[in-house]
Amino acid sequence: MKLLRIAPFLKIGLCLQTLLVAGCAGSIDESNGQLEHHRPDHKPPTFPAAVEQLAQRHERIVVESHSNEAGALERELHEQMDIVNWLPELAADSALKKQDWEQVQTASKELLNIYQQVDATVHGSPRGEWPAAVSKIPPIVETLTRLVPRSTDQL
């Protein structure tokens, strides 16, 4: 009779043990024993590379917006928003000073807001006009481009 009362706890314990053993998806680095996380292929390794990709991808997004291939445009747009989200992290890993990093943070928020508006337009049915704010993207990217040399200055 006591075994029946304990059985539910055993089941819960076995489930928890299975979860602990399985852990999260990832692999363990043999050299240091730490869990490695997946790095998306489109994540730039550095702040300068991210800024360069922003400019190139923006041009592709503009071109793809005129095509009938919605899937390619959506993928490019979502990857662009990923890169915009990574900008502050990549800038923090560079030699930028706090004031410059704050410019990156502000630019990132502005770009994300604009690309979210574009994304909403792309997902709209029928496809509407792009938000007027899209014209602000090149000057924002130019501001980021001017910060690139400072991001590689030696400390």
Image (cartoon, helix red, strand yellow):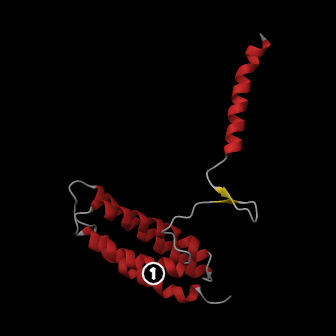
Residue that protrudes farthest toward the right in the picture: 2
State which quadrant residue 132 falls in.
bottom left
Q: What is the secondary structure assignment of the residue under circle 1?
A: helix
Residue 86's x, y, as percent?
Answer: 52, 69
Which amino acid is tagged 1? Glu
Q: Locate the C terminus by quadrant.
A: bottom right
Residue 129 image point, x, y percent: 22, 65
Residue farthest front in this picture: 30
| Residue drawn at (75%, 60%) of the image | 33
Q: Residue at x 76, y 19 (%)?
A: 6
The answer to whether residue 66 is left or right of residue 47 is: left
Task: Name the quarter where the N terminus is drawn.
Answer: top right
Location of residue 40 with respect to 5 vertically, above or below: below
Specify the quadrant of the image occupied by residue 4.
top right
- Point out residue 90 in the picture as x, y percentages from the top left corner: 57, 74
Outermost left residue: 126
State the residue position of label 1.
Answer: 52
In the figure, is residue 67 to the left or right of 59? left
The answer to whether residue 13 is above or below residue 25 is: above
User: Measuring 29% from the left and 73% from the top, which residue is drawn there?
Assistant: 62
Residue 109 versus residue 72: which sits nearer the camera?
Answer: 72
Instruction: Please identify the quarter of the rendering in which residue 57 is found.
Output: bottom left
Is 123 situated above or below 98?
above
Residue at horizontal 62%, vertical 60%? 37
Residue 16, position as x, y percentages in the image? 70, 36
Report crowding for label 1: few under 14, some 14 to 19, many 20 or more residues within 10 A (C-alpha). some
User: Total marks drawn?
Assistant: 1
